[in-house]
Image (cartoon, rainbow, N blue to C red):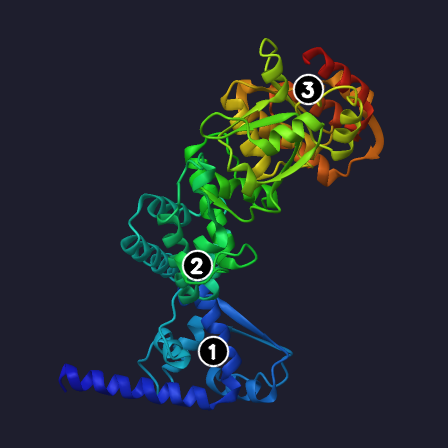
């Protein structure tokens, strides 16, 4: 008999064996257990145990193994023994691995082999995207995904759920990265694009990059990575706050909303392209008014200056920034006898509009004095602003002694205290240590008289 005929007979025997074992319910649980054992062990070996076997299982396995198992409360079968006993049946000559492949309906791989194939397929998936999206930021981000860098877990989970859906979403995100209005700069507010308009141009859907969608979250993760590549001081967060996202988008020349994104300020003048003071700002300055200036209006000005610097140019250019609106108003109430000092309120995390105003003020040499709360979130904000403005920013009433004066009865939870682990700015490390020691927050409201006293020295 030639080799071809032998192969045909072997295949016929295997096919008959597969059909037999599929038709015998008493073997189903055993063969499925064999498959799992092979996948985990990586070879035909070891044994499996069937607890509480049914009558059908007891009878079928007893017949094959040629031993009485009818009274057994559990049955343990070695894979090697099962394969040997096949030789005593009409299916002699077939291998257990071939039988398991036929029974499963596909070639069974070990877990190691499956993981290797899985990683190869995913790498090919990402390389395919890199081939159709060769722009630098696209390539860098795809490489970051491939190495399972920070912020990419959701993408890998999405690949496991449905690679095709993920591919469609990543193509849109990559297209967005390639079309960023001012990648890595975000310095010219006049050229900002609104997020819905930008999204519509990229995805043909104004909601295509909404932040409550997977596609929008992938976009933000990509921007965080690119920003971190350009700015060593930028920290990638797993769940960035809304204002952190606004600032991130602004860095790349995109704004989510230019009406609700505003800055609260007083005592500041704005100038147009010709260097003339703009009427709205001048009227507010002269009348002692506090303004909530939306980003839409802010971008119409080319430069900003503390009002006091125009009437008394010999004085140092300064701006006083506080975190809380109540503190802002308390301080402003102490200057009803004169024009208001240059003041800004961040209302907690600074909005993009606030940052852009401070950017312009810092650019003309204005010193930013910043005062915030003595809690983990307050120290985080102080550190972010200090890193953004460097020597242009001075921490104001922010040392350990000021903390002792402002300490409250509010006890900080362990979850909030963990946020202090990321505080490493030299100017507030002592405050961080004291908060870790007392577990209590301190608030600006206690320091209002001292804040007012400090401002009077400069105006």
Query: In the figure, is residue 182 to the left or right of 413?
Result: left
- State the residue at coordinates (62%, 12%): 312
Of the 4 image quadrants, the one containing the C terminus is top right
* CA distance for labels 2 and 3: 44 Å
Q: Secondary structure at mark 3?
A: loop
Provide the secondary structure element on which disc 1 rests: helix
2 or 3: tag closer to the N-terminus: 2
* Residue placed under numbered mark 3 in the picture: 396
Q: Is residue 229 above or below residue 78?
A: above
Residue 339 rendering spot, x and y as whole percentages? 71, 21
Q: Give the alpha-carbon distance from disc 3 to disc 1, as whole Å.
A: 73 Å
Q: Where is residue 444 drawn, in percent x and y?
A: 77, 27
Q: Dots 3 and 1: beta carbons under 8 Å? A: no
Return the residue nearer the eye: 42 or 45: 42
Q: Quadrant of residue 136?
A: top left
Quadrant holding the N terminus: bottom left
Return the residue found at the far top.
314
Mark 3 vs 1, N-terminal side: 1
Q: At x 44% / y 77%, what residue is drawn?
A: 82
For the question of whether residue 42 can be seen, the reply is no
In the image, which is nearer the foreground, mark 2 or mark 3? 2
Front of the two marks 3 and 1: 3
Q: Nearer the viewer, residue 82 or 286?
A: 286
First in sequence: mark 2 or mark 1?
Answer: 1
Q: Is residue 132 above or below residue 323?
A: below
Q: Which residue is mark 1?
A: 31
Q: Which residue is mark 2?
A: 200
Between 238 and 147, the one nearer to me in the picture: 238
The x and y percentages for residue 387 are: 55, 26
């Amino acid at each position: 008999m030639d080799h071809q005929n032998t192969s045909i007979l072997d295949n016929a025997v295997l096919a008959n064996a597969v059909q037999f074992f599929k038709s015998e319910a008493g073997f189903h649980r055993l063969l499925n257990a064999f498959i799992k054992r092979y996948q985990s062990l990586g070879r035909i070996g070891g044994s499996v145990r069937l607890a509480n076997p049914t009558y059908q299982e007891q009878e079928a396995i007893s017949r094959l193994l040629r031993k009485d198992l009818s009274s057994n409360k559990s049955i343990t079968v070695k894979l090697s023994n099962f394969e040997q006993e096949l030789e005593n049946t009409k299916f002699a000559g077939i291998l257990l691995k071939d039988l398991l492949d036929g029974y499963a309906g596909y070639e069974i791989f070990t877990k190691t082999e499956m993981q290797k194939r899985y990683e190869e397929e995913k790498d090919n998936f990402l390389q395919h995207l890199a081939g159709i999206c060769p722009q630098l930021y696209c390539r860098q981000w795809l490489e970051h995904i491939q190495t399972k860098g920070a912020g990419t877990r959701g993408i890998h989970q999405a690949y496991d759920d449905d690679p095709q859906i993920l591919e469609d979403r990543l193509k849109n995100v990559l297209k967005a990265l390639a079309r960023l209005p001012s990648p890595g700069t975000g310095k010219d507010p006049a050229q900002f694009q609104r997020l819905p308009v930008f999204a519509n141009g990229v995805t043909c859907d104004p909601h295509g990059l909404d932040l409550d969608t997977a596609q929008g979250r992938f976009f933000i993760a990509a921007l965080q990575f690119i920003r971190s590549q350009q700015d060593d001081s930028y920290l990638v967060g797993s769940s960035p706050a809304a204002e952190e996202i606004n600032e991130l988008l602004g860095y790349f020349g995109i704004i989510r909303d230019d009406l609700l994104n505003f800055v609260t300020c007083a005592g500041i003048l704005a100038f147009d392209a010709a260097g003339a003071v703009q009427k709205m700002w001048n009227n507010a300055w002269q009348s002692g008014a506090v303004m909530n200036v939306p980003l839409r209006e802010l971008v119409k000005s080319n430069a900003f200056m503390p009002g006091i610097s125009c009437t008394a140019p010999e004085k140092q250019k300064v701006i006083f920034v506080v975190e809380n609106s109540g503190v802002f108003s308390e301080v402003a109430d102490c200057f009803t006898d004169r024009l208001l000092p240059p003041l800004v309120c961040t209302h907690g995390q600074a909005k993009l509009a606030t940052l852009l105003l401070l950017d312009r003020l810092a650019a003309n040499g204005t010193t930013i004095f910043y005062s915030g709360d003595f809690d983990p979130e307050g120290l985080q904000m102080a550190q972010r602003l200090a890193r953004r403005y460097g020597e242009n920013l001075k921490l104001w009433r922010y040392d350990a002694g000021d903390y002792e004066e402002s300490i409250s009865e509010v006890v900080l939870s362990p979850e909030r205290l963990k946020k202090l682990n990321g505080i490493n700015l030299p100017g507030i490390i002592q405050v961080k240590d004291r908060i870790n020691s007392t577990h209590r927050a301190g608030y600006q409201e206690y320091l209002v008289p001292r804040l007012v006293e400090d401002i009077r020295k400069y105006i």
